[in-house]
């Protein structure tokens, strides 16, 4: 449709119809069974007419189902405006890819773009039009369960992934059969809940908000993201869903966002709980004034906006503005021409996952695995197994576990997943291998409420003892033990903050019992967040962090531990030494009393008495099956001027015996500023493949844009002065050079 046709449509719509376009309901309201609908309808305080006019629906999928709902809806909708289907396609639809934090660890934005494109294709075939992704919230506190959904603790890295994911989902044309519109979330700073507790309030300075938290949302906007979601949290005591300065002035005004702004689930009504709105009507008022276009899952808008217009508290233009944005998105999606868009029963109901999707998932998983520790135990040689020189015991609850998907994998058939046990067999590792579960994932007494089901340990003490005994016996007979341990998948994600971020106790008991009889342990670590792994870190000889790797997890793990594919990941989020350090991040600030090697025994220094200041494993860190050597940095000039750029180069050599990828990372430090500056910040990275003995020269451009920050007068500028550039393997590299910036 042309813009004028949309205007005409808008002008013909009644006020009720317009307001209902701003309502988003979930699937229960569109069930085939009208009995099922009655309950929620009553509870929600809405009628059938409102359901038939609601503009969008969330988390309903399946081409057949979607088409049925769309057909029924269109029959009843006065102006035949198609319903828009949205869903949380976070790390895949049917093929589940590594969770987003793991994708961040790939440091490979092309890969993330490919993953987003495949996810979009699968979900579009199932009738989805919009995905609530990417989640680009900066995360520095591993207690928060949703760190798994972000690409990590670094602003620059998050910006790169935000752009790649939006481009991947939306492709060249959001109206095509293969693509989805993206929704960047959660605007803003949802990743900084006080004390890491879910939905908690956020306090931060406007400078930190601007310099660290906002850029990734802006990167998504600049990449053309069609939608944005407000977050649940308050920022400096104002709920974001009613925070006009953030949503109108910054998001729309400064960033130039022209798309649809949706609330998070019930976040409009929750302004009443926050004590920021008197009632739902007041909440609706505050949200519409802030420019929120869609009310997800409350009746605030549908039951109050008309009254607000009639009472003259808001103008109808405010409604028109929002509805026009919604209609424009429907139009871009091509729904007026084809309300089913990409929905395709044949493709959607295919018995098998396409082989190329599996291949991508397998590759992506290996690229996201971070080898934290290895004293030569990995990779295991297949040869030595076959010749009977070595016996390996595979022990732990994750050896047999099908579900290695992040919590945001709602629409999947877990039977499609490949376990470690299945992968061993399928890849021909049949000789001299023994397997034992050893324990459950959760400990007796643990209880994790879930979205669809609740998780707990269903084994008796007796059963656990038997399992452990069997595992210990097998460990004793083996030369080497591979232990697959970790958090339960439901222990991360939304509503899953943890104060104690260790591996469940029952598994630690198993680990220690195995350690008693066999010291050659390689741990395959599953988690939705960086964990406190001090115990296993001291004892295990190798640790491979595999996160929640998805459909092809088992195959990718087998590929990596047997050296078929080297581990390709580097940490996108620091592994704290213990929870006492969090929030912890590499780009911190110096204090006036900095800890150094010379003053560690002095009292009044910025340090802990009982733990180190540094994380167990820092941002950017990760080993692989070879070593790399870096040359010193060469700069094309020691002086950078505003309108030019300089080049920083290093030569990187693979000095080991195996080909592998290295993530070459460039950090910059502004030595003195009008406000204090971080000790360094990531400003560039390149992932390169090096054959044994091969050297590659890697160069980075440094320009004045990279040096900008919010200065003492709240201007975003680069200040003249001395800077250090660091290029190396992780955020602690000391390979440095210095340059001066002259305006
Ligand atoms: C609440 C979550 O915070 C958000 O990320 C998600 O997209 C919505 N629910 C819809 O499921």
Image (cartoon, helix red, strand yellow):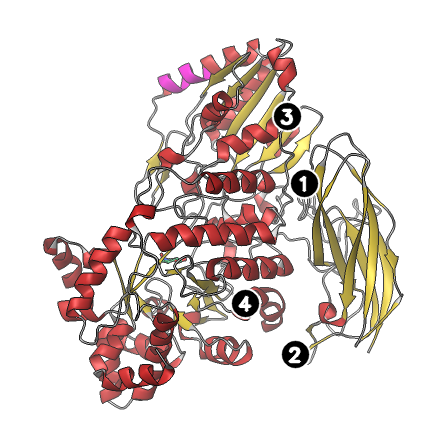
Res. 622 mark: 1
Q: Position of residue 528 (x, y in %)?
A: 49, 43
Taking the spot 34% from the left edge, 66% from the top edge, the residue there is: 270
Q: Spatial distance from mark 3 to mark 4, Cα to Cα?
A: 46 Å
Q: Spatial distance from mark 1 to mark 4, Cα to Cα?
A: 30 Å
Whichever of callouts 4 and 2 sits on the residue coming sooner in the sequence is 4
Please state if 595 lies on the left or on the right of 585 as rendered: right
Whichever of callouts 1 and 4 sits on the residue coming sooner in the sequence is 4
Q: Spatial distance from mark 1 to mark 2, Cα to Cα?
A: 37 Å
Q: Spatial distance from mark 2 to mark 3, Cα to Cα?
A: 49 Å
On the image, which quarter does residue 525 sit in? top right
Q: Position of residue 676 (x, y in %)?
A: 73, 68
Q: Nearer the viewer, mark 3 or mark 4?
A: 4
Which element type, helix, strand or loop, lies under badge 2? Answer: loop
Q: Nearer the viewer, residue 564 or 575?
A: 564
Which residue is denoted by mark 3 in the rendering? 539
Q: Spatial distance from mark 4 to mark 2, Cα to Cα?
A: 25 Å
Q: Nearer the viewer, mark 4 or mark 2?
A: 4
On the image, which quarter does residue 308 sit in? bottom left
Which residue is denoted by mark 2 in the rendering? 714
Neighbours of disc 3 within 10 Å: few (<14), some (14-19), many (20+): some
Ligand 1 within 8 A of label 3's CB? no
Tell me where the magenta segment starts and ends, as one range.
462-468
Which residue is denoted by mark 4 in the rendering? 223
Whichever of callouts 3 and 4 sits on the residue coming sooner in the sequence is 4
Please state if 487 lies on the left or on the right of 650 as rendered: left
Neighbours of disc 4 within 10 Å: few (<14), some (14-19), many (20+): some
Whichever of callouts 1 and 2 sits on the residue coming sooner in the sequence is 1
**Looking at the image, in which quadrant does ligand 1 appear?**
bottom left
Which element type, helix, strand or loop, lies under badge 1? Answer: loop
Q: Position of residue 410 (x, y in %)?
A: 35, 46
């Amino acid at each position: 449709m042309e813009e004028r046709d949309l205007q005409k449509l808008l002008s013909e719509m009644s006020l009720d119809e317009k307001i209902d376009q701003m309502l988003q309901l979930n699937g229960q309201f569109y069930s085939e069974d009208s009995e099922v609908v009655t309950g929620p309808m009553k509870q929600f305080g809405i009628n059938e007419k409102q359901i038939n006019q609601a503009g969008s629906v969330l988390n309903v999928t399946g081409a057949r189902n979607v088409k049925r709902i769309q057909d029924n809806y269109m029959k009843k909708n006065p102006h035949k405006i198609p319903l828009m289907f949205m869903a949380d396609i976070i790390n895949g639809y049917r093929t589940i890819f590594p969770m987003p934090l793991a994708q961040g660890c790939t440091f490979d934005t092309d890969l993330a773009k490919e993953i987003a494109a495949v996810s979009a294709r699968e979900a579009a075939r199932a009738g989805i039009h919009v995905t609530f992704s990417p989640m680009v919230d900066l995360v520095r506190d591993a207690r928060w369960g949703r760190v798994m959904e972000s690409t990590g603790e670094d602003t620059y890295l998050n910006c790169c992934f935000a752009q790649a994911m939006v481009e991947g989902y939306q492709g060249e044309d959001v109206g095509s059969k293969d693509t989805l519109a993206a929704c960047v979330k959660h605007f803003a700073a949802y990743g900084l809940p006080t004390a890491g507790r879910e939905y908690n309030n956020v306090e931060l300075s406007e400078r930190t908000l601007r310099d660290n938290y906002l850029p990734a949302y802006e990167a998504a906007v600049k990449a053309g993201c069609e939608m944005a979601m407000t977050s649940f949290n308050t920022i400096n005591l104002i709920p974001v869903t009613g925070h006009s300065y953030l949503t109108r002035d910054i998001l729309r005004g400064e960033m130039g966002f022209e798309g649809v702004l949706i609330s998070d689930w019930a976040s409009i009504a929750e302004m009443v709980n926050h004590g920021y709105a008197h009632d739902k009507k007041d909440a609706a008022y505050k949200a519409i004034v802030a420019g929120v276009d869609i009310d997800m899952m409350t009746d605030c808008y549908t039951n109050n906006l008309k009254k607000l217009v009639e009472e003259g508290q808001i103008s109808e233009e405010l409604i028109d503005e929002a509805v026009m944005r919604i209609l424009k998105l429907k139009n871009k999606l091509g729904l007026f021409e084809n309300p089913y868009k990409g929905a395709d029963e044949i493709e959607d109901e295919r018995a098998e996952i396409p082989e190329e999707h599996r291949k991508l998932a397998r590759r992506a998983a290996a690229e996201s695995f971070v080898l934290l520790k290895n004293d030569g135990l990995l990779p295991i040689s297949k040869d030595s197994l076959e010749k009977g020189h070595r016996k390996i015991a595979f022990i732990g609850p994750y050896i047999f576990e099908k579900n290695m998907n992040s919590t945001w994998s709602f629409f999947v058939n877990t039977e499609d997943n490949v376990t470690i046990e299945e992968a061993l067999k399928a890849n021909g590792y049949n000789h001299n291998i023994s397997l034992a579960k050893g324990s459950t994932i959760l400990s007796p007494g643990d209880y994790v409420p879930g979205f669809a089901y609740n998780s707990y340990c269903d084994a008796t003490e007796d059963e656990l003892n038997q399992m452990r005994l069997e595992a210990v016996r097998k460990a004793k007979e083996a030369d080497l033990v591979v232990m697959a341990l970790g958090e339960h998948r439901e222990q991360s994600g939304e509503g899953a903050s943890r104060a104690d971020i260790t591996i469940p106790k029952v598994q630690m008991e198993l680990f220690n019992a195995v350690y008693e009889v066999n010291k050659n342990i390689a741990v395959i670590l599953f988690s939705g967040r960086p964990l406190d792994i001090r115990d296993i870190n001291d004892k295990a000889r190798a640790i491979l962090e595999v996160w929640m790797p998805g459909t092809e997890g088992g195959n990718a793990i087998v590929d990596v531990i047997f050296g078929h594919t080297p581990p390709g990941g580097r940490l996108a989020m620091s592994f704290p030494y213990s929870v006492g350090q969090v929030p912890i991040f590499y780009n911190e600030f110096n204090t006036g009393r900095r800890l150094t090697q010379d003053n560690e025994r002095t009292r009044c220094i910025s340090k802990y008495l009982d733990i180190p200041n540094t994380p167990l494993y820092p941002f950017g860190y990760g080993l692989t099956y070879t070593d790399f050597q870096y040359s010193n940095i060469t700069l094309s000039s020691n002086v950078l001027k505003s309108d030019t750029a300089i080049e920083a180069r290093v030569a990187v050599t693979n000095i080991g015996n195996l080909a592998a990828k290295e993530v070459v990372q460039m950090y910059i430090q502004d030595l003195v500023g009008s406000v204090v500056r971080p000790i360094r910040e990531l400003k560039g990275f390149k992932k390169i493949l090096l054959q044994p003995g091969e050297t590659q020269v890697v160069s980075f451009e440094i320009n004045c844009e990279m040096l900008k920050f919010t200065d003492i007068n709240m201007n975003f500028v680069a200040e003249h002065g001395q800077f250090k550039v660091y290029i190396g393997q992780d955020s602690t590299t000391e390979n440095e050079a210095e340059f001066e910036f002259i305006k």
